[in-house]
Amino acid sequence: MRSPSIARASLEEVAAAEGPRRLEAAYGVALAWDMANRADRALDTLAPLLRSDLGEIGPAVLETYAAIADRLDERDAAGRARARLLTDYPRSMEAAAAATVLGAPQEGETGPGAIAIEVGRFTNASRARALLQRVRRAGFRDARVIQRGEGPSRTWAVRLGRYTSELAARQAGLRAERGLGVEYRLERGR
């Protein structure tokens, strides 16, 4: 609708009722607030939804919440929404976009050299490949297995990717910790 206030009024009635489309209507109310250039009200409308089971509408709600939180300079809230998106809906298009945002270097945060993130080291290549599959399903498309050493001391490490800033690397590492239950380690200049 071209009139956010008319749309919002209609959707608020549905959102207030305990019907099957309550979540979708509340999401529509938030979109109407955003269309009316009231991002603060949109975020306030979306916040209570995050405390419920979002079902099919979850990826859209979380992506919208993160985008609006970014615009309002609420980076922590945006990061939490994206982390939940990656954890709860890892195969969604919205999760792929969130992985890109979380992995992108932030302006002014670049430093010398590349920083790699290692999330597991194994003496068995098949265990490393199994973790690699999980990591890629979680949205880390650049992940790979790196062989280290030779002979009996040979190991295989799972690396998420390379980042140009420590902030971006730590964000990706934290996302992997939360979403995959692994610990991460930063490696500089490798």
Image (cartoon, helix red, strand yellow):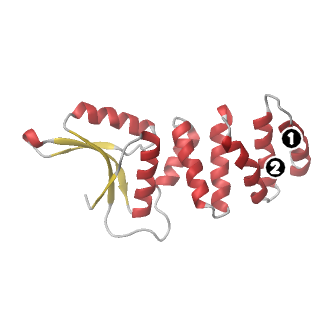
Q: Work out whether residue 129 or residue 16 is closer to the camera in this orientation and state it.
A: 16
Q: Is residue 132 left or right of residue 174?
A: left
Instruction: State whether residue 78 is above or below residue 131.
Output: below
- Number of numbered labels in the structure image: 2
Image spot of residue 184 (x, y percent):
35, 50
Per the model, the C-alpha gap separating discs 2 and 1 is 9 Å
Q: Are marks 2 and 1 in contact (CB under 8 Å)?
A: yes
Residue drawn 32% across the image and 61% down it: 114
Image spot of residue 133 (x, y percent):
37, 34
* Quadrant that contains the C terminus: bottom left
Instruction: State whether residue 160 is above or below residue 93.
Output: below
Residue drawn 37% across the image and 43% down it: 182
Give residue 11's mark: 1
Q: Secondary structure at mark 2?
A: helix
Image spot of residue 177 (x, y percent):
42, 46
Reading the image, the residue beneath label 2 is 32
Q: Secondary structure at mark 1?
A: helix
> Which sits earlier in the primary sequence, circle 2 or circle 1?
1
